[in-house]
Amino acid sequence: MSRPLWQAAIASLLLANGACSPKETPRSEPLPAPDRLDTAVAVAARGDGAEARGDGAEARGDGASGRPGAGQGAPVQAPPPCKDGDTDPHDLRCTGLYSDPGARTIAAGVREFKPAFELWSDGAEKTRWIYLPPGSTIDVSRMNDWTFPVGTRLWKEFRLPVAGAMRRIETRLLWKTAEDRWTRATYVWSEDGASALQVKAGVPEVPGTGGYAVPAQVDCIRCHAGKTDNPLGFEAIQLAAPEASGLTYAELAERGLLTTSGGALPGADALQVPGSATERRALGLLHANCGVSCHHPLGGATHFEMRLDIDAAGRVGAVRDTRVYKTAINKPSKVRPPGAPPEARYYRLRPLDPDRSTLLRAMSRRDAPGAPPEQMPPIGTRRVDEAGVAAVRAWIEAMTPAAGYPPAAP
C-alpha cells in the first residue's frame, strides 16, 4: 500500500524539526470558582505563551489526585467559561471527559477501555477513555489502520506514586476535529488534584516522581504520525485479545460500531497474538511499544518490522508468519555495543543468544541527555522496562529448533 501524501509530508517535517498545531472545537461546560495552581505548572504553561489559569473543582477523595509540582503557587487568573467554538481549550473540563468535573463523573457516551498490551510509560498507571459521536462508526476496511469518525475523542490519564499515594499527573487528549486534523493536548494536574490545565511545553521533571517527564505536545507527532489516523492503542489486535477490557473488539462488533467495505468482519479468534505464553508476551509487547508507531511499512523505521499485521483474510497467522520473525531473527545488525571485538557479529534477534541480540540491548538502555538516540523506545521514557526486557529475553532463550526456530546464525 502506498504511503498517503499527507502522511509522507508530516514524516518529512518530523524528520526536520517536528510540528504540532492543535485546533479544536470543545463543547460548553460550566466552571467552578477559581483556585490555585502549582508554581511548576504555572511556569510551564506561561513558557509557551499560554496564561496560567486555575480552577476550583474539588478533588475526589480516592487518593488519585494529581501532583505534577511541589509547593504552593501564587493565585492565578480564573479562566472564562468554556465556550463552543473555542479553538484551544485550556482546561481539561472543556474537553467533554467529565459531566461533573468536581466529582470526576465520566460523561455519558464516554467509554473506558484497556488495550491488551500497554505502552511502557516509566511505570505510570493509566486509564483510557473514548467517545464516538452518536450514530457514527469506525471504518476498519484496513484492519491494521482504522479510520475514526470526525468528533472522536480519546483521553489517557497517567498516575504515579507521590509521597506514598497514587496521584494524577497528566491527562492527554486526541480529538478528531476534521477529516484530516487531530487535536493533541496535554493537561497537567495541580498538586491538590483540583485542576488540570493545558501545558504545551511539557514538564521536564515532575517533582516527587523520580524523574518522570511530561512530554511537550510537539513530541506527540513523533509516534502518532506512524498511523494514517492518529490513535495507537485502540485497534484490532489490542482490543481482541483476552487481556483487553472495557470497550473491546467483540463489543464494538456486536454493537455495529465497526464497518468495512471488504466483506465480513473477522472474528476475535482470528486476531489473537500467536504462539506460546512466552511468545505472546514478547510479540504483544513489541507490537504495542515498537510496531504500531514506528516499525511497520508506513512508519518511520521500516528496516525491520514489529507490528503484528492482519492479512487480507482477516488473520494474524502463526509466529513464523509475523514480520518480526521474518525481518529480525538472524538478520545482521549494524548496531554494535561499545568494546565489541571487530570480528564479532550481532543480529537483531539471535536465537538462544540474548547477548548478541541488539534489539534487547536497545530495550535495556537509556540514552544520556544529548547523546545519539540508541534506546528503544527512543522517546517518552527515562526508565528501562525491566519486565519488558525480561519478556523478550525469555522469548530469545526459548527459540529452539524444537520450537520451530532456525539455528542461530554464526
Image (cartoon, rainbow, N blue to C red):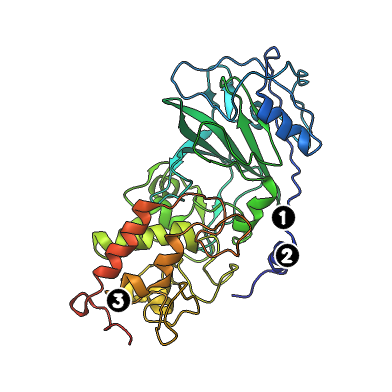
Q: Residue at x 56, y 56 (%)?
A: 368
Q: Position of residue 145 (x, y in %)?
A: 54, 61
Q: Of the residues shown, which amino acid type is indicated by label 3? A: Pro
How many residues crowd around disc 1 within 10 Å: few (fewer than 14), some, or many (20 or more)? few
Residue contact between numbered discs 3 and 2, judged by CB atoms under 8 Å? no
Residue contact between numbered discs 2 and 1, judged by CB atoms under 8 Å? yes
Q: Of the residues shown, which amino acid type is indicated by label 1? A: Asp
Distance between the alpha carbons at the discs numbered 3 and 2: 39 Å
Viewer-side residue, 35 vs 389: 389
Q: Quadrant of residue 360?
A: bottom left
Q: Nearer the viewer, mark 3 or mark 1?
A: 3
For mark 3, give the secondary structure: loop
* Residue identified by numbered label 2: 6
For mark 1, give the secondary structure: loop
Q: Quadrant of residue 364?
A: bottom left
Residue furthest to the top = 33
For mark 2, give the secondary structure: helix
Q: Does 24 sit left or right of 138 as displayed?
A: right
Distance between the alpha carbons at the discs numbered 2 and 1: 9 Å
* Residue identified by numbered label 1: 180
Q: Position of residue 70 (x, y in %)?
A: 59, 25
* Residue identified by numbered label 3: 351
